[in-house]
Every structure is written in structure tokens, then in C-alpha cells.
Amino acid sequence: MVGIKIFCPMATINNNWYPISEQQKKDLKIRIDNGEMETNGKVFRIKTVNKLSEETISQILSYVGKINSLVNPKWKGGIQTLWLQILNHKELSHLFFSKPQSKKCKEFEKNNVLRIVGILRENNVYQNHYNNTQIHRLIENTNKDSNLRVVIGNGLDRKFTNIILCIIRGCNR
């Protein structure tokens, strides 16, 4: 059996959209041909969401806004525009969808947001003399350590990093 990732818990029967419960997702028998899935004799087509909601974008901007004091002076006026371009990029938006197994942050994928913060720091969007611990304390508003601190320096797949670098070069003044 082959599994596929469903970003949006919706399916359609005869072009009418219906929510899929967590239990239904577990019970699904997946057919890869034609991008359909079958459960109990009913055929569903998967609807994937490739664009973040305005609410999720707002939550991410608020989250990274906590470290605006670390933004390099030449990026002060353009940091929000840069983040909006990253969040709205069609090849990057899936990185921000929260995983179903997420326990701490169900709104968006914090790990990937922090990985991008690390990429932006390495490319002088954020001042690079701030280390992971300092960034973590500001963005999480805590002195407690967590696995999120380590993620900041990990980066992303090369393909996604290159897209982000291209966005930076386009925004850089």
C-alpha cells in the first residue's frame, strides 16, 4: 500500500466537497492512478491546498516579527515584504503547513520557519552575530531550551534554499 500526504482534510464525491475525519483518513485505501482514493467503495478525489490562508500568514508574520530587532538595518523597511514573498511562493508554501502529528504548534510548521530564519541570518537579512540561542529566546519568548533552537541552523533542501536566495537577491536594495 502506498500513502500520500493530504494537506487539506477534504474530499469530493461527484464534485461536492466533504470533510474527512482523522479516522476516515486512517481507514482510507489509496489508489494512486488518477489521483483518487477509495474507501468503502466510494471514490474520493483529493483536494490539496497550495496556498496559505491569510490567518496562517498573519500568524507566521507575527511569530517572526518577534525578532524584527535583529533585522539588518538595510532590510528594516523590507523584511515584511521579503517574508510575504517567501510565504506566498508556490514552491515554498507547502513547507509551512502544520503536520497532523504536531503537538506544540498546530497553526504552522515552526521548524521550517526557523530554518528559513537561519538562511536569512546567513545571508545578512538578520544580523549574523546573533546565535541560535539568542534568536530562540526572542522568538519563543522564553529562557527554556527546546529542540527548536537547534533547527535554526539546519537549513532546508538545496532546491528550497536556492529559491529563498533568489527571493533575497530580488528584494535586496
Image (spheres, rainbow, N blue to C red):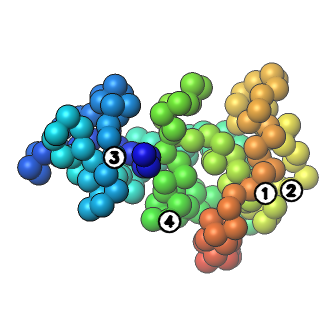
Inspect the image, locate mark 3, and give the three-letter code of the amino acid beneath it: Ile
* The one of 46 and 55 positioned closer to us in this rendering: 46
Name the residue rendered at 24%, 44% in the picture: 38
Q: Counting residues from the N terminus, which is met first, the one under dot 1 or under dot 2? A: 1
Q: Nearer the viewer, mark 1 or mark 4?
A: 4
Q: Counting residues from the N terminus, which is met first, the one under dot 2 or under dot 3? A: 3
Q: Is residue 2 left or right of residue 173?
A: left
Q: Is residue 82 left or right of residue 129?
A: left
Q: Which residue is mark 1?
A: 121
Q: Counting residues from the N terminus, which is met first, the one under dot 4 or under dot 3? A: 3
How far, Cα to Cα, is label 1 from label 2?
Answer: 5 Å
Q: Which residue is mark 3?
A: 30
Q: Secondary structure at mark 4?
A: loop
Residues at circles 3 and 1 in contact by the CB criterion of under 8 Å: no
Inspect the image, locate mark 1, and give the three-letter code of the amino acid beneath it: Arg
Q: Secondary structure at mark 2?
A: loop
Q: Which residue is mark 4?
A: 91
Q: Residue furthest front?
A: 1
Residue 156 versus residue 56 in the image, above or below: below
Residue 79 versus residue 18 in the image, above or below: below
How far, Cα to Cα, is label 1 from label 4?
Answer: 21 Å
Quadrant holding the C terminus: bottom right
Q: Counting residues from the N terminus, which is met first, the one under dot 4 or under dot 2? A: 4
Inspect the image, locate mark 4, and give the three-letter code of the amino acid beneath it: Glu
- The label on residue 92 is none
- The label on residue 128 is 2
